[in-house]
Image (tube, rainbow, N blue to C red):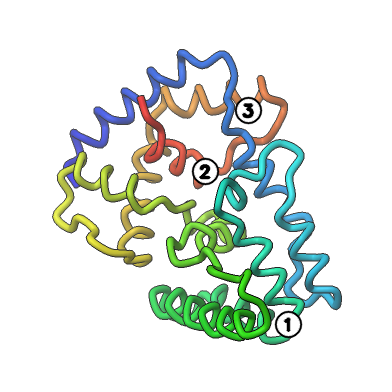
Amino acid sequence: MKVHLIKERISEYVNALKKLEYFPEKYYWENHQNFQSNWDIEALDFDTMFDHSFSSKISLRLWKHENYFPKEIMRKFISHDKEFVRTIFRDLLNEEKDLNMRVNRFLLYCDELLMILQKKTSKAADHFHHDQKMIFNYLAFSYPEDYVLYDFEKFAKTMQLFQARNIPRMHDPELFTKMMKAIRLFLSKDESFLQLKNQFSDKEGIDLNELSFWVYDFYTREY
């Protein structure tokens, strides 16, 4: 990625933020705080824990919208075999293992569970994890210092904008995570952005300081 292009984009982002009277995407942080308050992979009632972890008083947009409901399908998986689902989450969230392998195994397990559900009911047509958005919800909510929420199309567009050497043609969690860490570093050093971040945090009455979600807002925002 070319440094001057990143800095120019951050300047544009700061100018866009200055025009906002309020910050409509504060639900990123509210969703995360709710997850942190409820997530317990050892919970006896795994289904209730999962349900409460992905709920919001502001917006369900990260895991539910038209023709997209990965949370509901995961709860069906849990209902079928909660201990297996617990195991696949342990594997996904195990930072000692290769990220790409973890994500691929998680998808494989979801495919297997979906096939079992399809034998029981024709209504289970998809598990909605192949776009990897929900997978990165799990990762970013668990480890916000290391992961960022995911949107493949906007990530690829951002890499083109920054004239990166490696433009993603397919999902590559390791590449995405590496690039997001670089962007996070640039944002963390921009004084104008940091000042605005703090102002929005005070104005909205919610802690908006976790940079992971600002990085997501930065690379996905249209302006």
**Label 2 amino acid?**
Phe
- The residue at which mark 1 appears reads as 80
Q: Is residue 104 left or right of residue 87?
A: left
Q: Position of residue 128 (x, y in %)?
A: 52, 63
**Separation of marks 3 and 1 at Cα, in angstroms:** 41 Å
Judged from this view, the residue extending furthest toward the right is 44
Q: Nearer the viewer, residue 168 or 143?
A: 168
Could you tell me which secondary element the residue under label 1 belongs to?
helix
Quarter-of-image position of residue 41: bottom right
- The residue at which mark 3 appears reads as 201
- Name above or below for residue 108 compared with residue 39: below
Quarter-of-image position of residue 202: top right
Q: Position of residue 34 (x, y in %)?
A: 74, 50
Counting other residues with Cα less than 10 Å from the Cα at mark 1, is it few (<14), some (14-19), or many (20 or more)? some
Q: Position of residue 118 (x, y in %)?
A: 60, 80
Q: Going 41% across and 80% down the picture, which residue do you hit?
A: 101
- Name above or below for residue 98 compared with residue 29: below
Could you tell me which secondary element the residue under label 2 belongs to?
helix
Q: Nearer the viewer, residue 30 or 73?
A: 73
Q: Are marks 3 and 2 in contact (CB under 8 Å)?
A: no
Q: Nearer the viewer, residue 48 or 218?
A: 48
**Sequence order check, earlier mark of 3 and 1:** 1
- The residue at which mark 2 appears reads as 213
Q: Going 76% across and 69% down the picture, which residue do you hit?
A: 40
Question: Closer to us: mark 1 or mark 2?
Answer: 1
